[in-house]
Image (cartoon, rainbow, N blue to C red):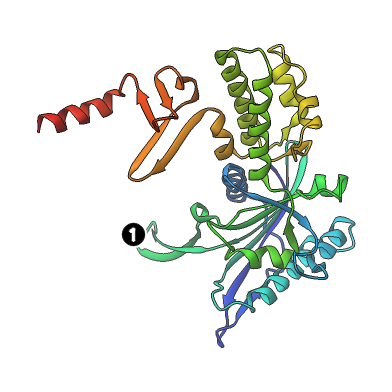
Amino acid sequence: MIKIDQAILHAVQRDGEGELRCKLRPQPLEYSDALDELLGELHRLYTAKAGKGYGYFGVPEGEDEANPAFSEALTQWHTGNLGFVEFSGRAGKLLEQELAKYDFAQGGYLLMAAYNHIACDYLFVALMSPKPSVSVSQEMEVHGSEHLDLSNLQLAARIDLSEWRADPTSKKYISFIKGRAGRKVADFFLDFMGCVEGVNAKRQNKELVQALEDYVATTDLDAEERQQCRDAVFDYCKTQISAGGEVQLKDIADEFADRGAEEFYQFTSAGEYELEETFPGDQSTLRQLKKFSGTGGGVSLSFDAHHLGERVVWDAVNDTITIKGVPPNLLDQLQRRLKA
């Protein structure tokens, strides 16, 4: 459950000259079951989004100075020198100025919401697209309307206000949805907030996987016990991701301690691993602990890691993989093709 402090919507629309303007709402949204449901669903969808980026208010690479307007307004709101409506209005105008730099920019609704979840304060910022829909009134009349397209949440960021207050030097108190590939169309959304990428979550998780593989190779654990360690770490990280928490290196070390291997934390500290004490989990990267998978040349293959060396045998010399016990649904397809 989330506890809403304040929330507001501003409309970003094209004027008569085709320029995008931010039409500001003069008061916050009144609390209602609909608002509670909206923000609860947005919190759930955003938390579940894979591959998010993490950053902070700072100087973009290749530039001499930062754009502090958003962070300054945030500080003024936080210290009580600026009301939430005024703060959101400044943010709306900053977004308007940033959108004016791009021909591709589309309008929508700027949603800003301050809320609390599990003892953490958050500020959620999103530019949401309207989607046409049709409704039927009690008089059986058909009406056209718009609704917020939650399923296509692409331009959104969340500031962990608790972490921002406690550790201003942190480089991961802002999370944001990353673009699909290359330079993001969403760059303007980060620029208007003055946010730059800090911690690379995917890289941190790759380092963790590598450190784990290196560590279990130094132990006297057998193959099954090593896989149990991998499974335990994956399950711990998955739980943290689902809860919106972060991966803690010392907690991972505790997972090993239960299996008679207490030195993992010292191993990572002494080794050449660029691992932070805490970092966001990335489930797609961590899945390597549980599964092997790959696609290429018209062939896709995926199998649970514990099958390697048993049901699945890899011959590195001859570049072949042998599968013992073909999956029933694949076997059925093969048999039907053979009969044909």
Circle 1 packing at 10 Å, graded few (<14), some (14-19), many (20+), is: few
Q: Above or below — where is 155 with respect to 200?
A: below
Can residue 131 be seen by looking at this rendering?
A: yes
Look at 81% across and 30% down and name the residue there: 270
Query: In which quadrant of the rendered view does residue 120 lie?
Result: top right
Query: In which quadrant of the rendered view does residue 296 lie?
Result: top left
- Report x, y in % for residue 331: 24, 25
- Report x, y in % for residue 236: 65, 26
Q: Relative to residue 74, is residue 181 drawn left or right? A: left
Look at 77% across and 39% down and name the residue there: 276
Residue occupying the far front of the picture: 317
In the rendered view of the protein, which quadrant contains the C terminus? Answer: top left
Query: In which quadrant of the rendered view does residue 335 lie?
Result: top left
Residue occupying the far left of the picture: 340
Name the amino acid, label 1. Met
Q: Above or below — where is 25 with respect to 55?
A: below
Q: Above or below — where is 3 with respect to 185?
A: above
The foreground one among 8 and 118 is 118
Look at 37% across and 30% down and name the residue there: 320
Q: Relative to residue 166, is residue 124 drawn left or right? A: left
Q: Relative to residue 74, is residue 299 drawn left or right? A: left
Look at 40% across and 23% down and name the residue there: 312
The foreground one among 262 and 246 is 262
Q: Which residue is mark 1?
A: 140
Give SS at disc 1.
loop
Can residue 1 be seen by looking at this rendering?
A: no
Q: Relative to residue 332, is residue 128 drawn left or right? A: right
Q: Above or below — where is 333 with respect to 29?
A: above
In the rendered view of the protein, which quadrant contains the N terminus? Answer: top right
- Report x, y in % for residue 226: 60, 18
